[in-house]
Image (tube, rainbow, N blue to C red):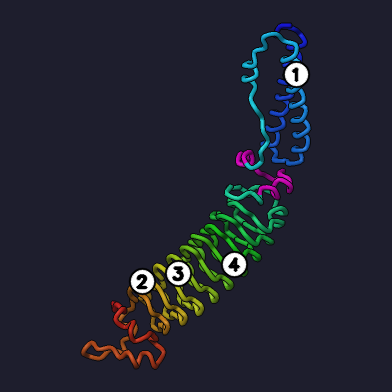
Amino acid sequence: MSQNCPIYKQKLEDWRASLRQVEVFRDKFLETGDLKLKDEFEKLKQELEANKKTFFDFAYEEVEDFDESITKMIPRINFDIKKDAKNLVLDEKTPWETIEVLSKIPDMETDLTNVKQEYKDQIKHWEGRIRDYSQEVSYSKLQTIGDNLDAEKANTFFVPSLETVRGALHVENVNVFSAPSLKTVGWLLHTEKAKTFSAPSLEIVRGHLYAENATTFSVPSLKTVEGDLIAEKATLFSAESLETVEAGLDVRNATIVYANSLETVGILYADKAETFSAPKLEEVEKVILTKQNFSEFWDGESNFDWDGAYNEGKLVIDEKIRGKVVWR
């Protein structure tokens, strides 16, 4: 029997037809993100494998000089949500089952901008990276994010349960940044336009903290910033638990600076400080202060009354740090 016989051709066509059905369902998944299709897909895939086996059994047993190279023209189809999900376009029609599966995939960026709000508010943990370009960003139950959270276009940002962001947290456009449960952020926390910055539970930022326009800056539990801490517009800087800022600390507009637990910092900008308290400071490159703001402690011969400033609580630093003060 040759490869031109009708039975051979029909079995080959059955195999190809099964393949086309599988491809249609894969495309439908990419269009809808509906994981309910996966079960039906698996049935079709079983039919595909059965038709493939039937074809080969017949070809090897009945066809003389069967040329297997013809089968190389038929591609292999696999359904792998971790790979295919990267091509998904999520919208309000995307079912919760899909979002739930995506939430468990690390090292993947997912755009949740257009999914239903009720689904966003069901998410508790997300292993990968979230992008959400909504103007109103709300994840009421979200607790942990394994990578970045990009909400840079948000005008409002509501994450009352969020505790950990292992990557960067971008919230550049809000006027008020409030994250009452936030404890840990990875390599960046950026709130460029926020006038008010409130993170009462924040303990560590493993990179930079930028709140450059916040006139009100409240981080009572913050202990460590492993990069720069920029709060240059804050009129009052009070971080009573802060121990370490590994790079620069910029609070140049604060008239009052309380950092009573601070031990280590790079360059500390406190240009407008009239009261400066950092009694535990041991390691610092330099502290920048303005001479005029402490004029009552300078005499006519440009000598500064360190003890007097200390005793009045105006400039509270250890004696060995005095040589690190740069007067402007």
Q: Amino acid at mark 2?
A: Ile
Residue under the point 55% across and 61% down: 174
Of 238 and 143, the residue lying toward us: 143
Which residue range is magenta in the image? 83-102
Residue type, numbered disc 3: Ala
Judged from the image, the secondary structure of the residue bearing numbered disc 4 is loop
Q: What is the crowding at mark 2: few (fewer than 14 residues within 10 Å), some, or many (at least 20)?
A: some
Task: Tell me the residue at 67%/9% (across/down).
Answer: 65
SS state under label 1: helix
| Disc number for residue 267 | 2
Residue 214 shows which numbered tag?
A: none
| Measured Cα–Cα span from mark 1 to mark 4 | 62 Å
The image position of residue 243, as x and y in percent, is 47, 76
CA separation in Å, label 1 and label 3: 73 Å
Q: Main secondary structure of the magenta part?
A: helix
Quarter of image, res 51: top right
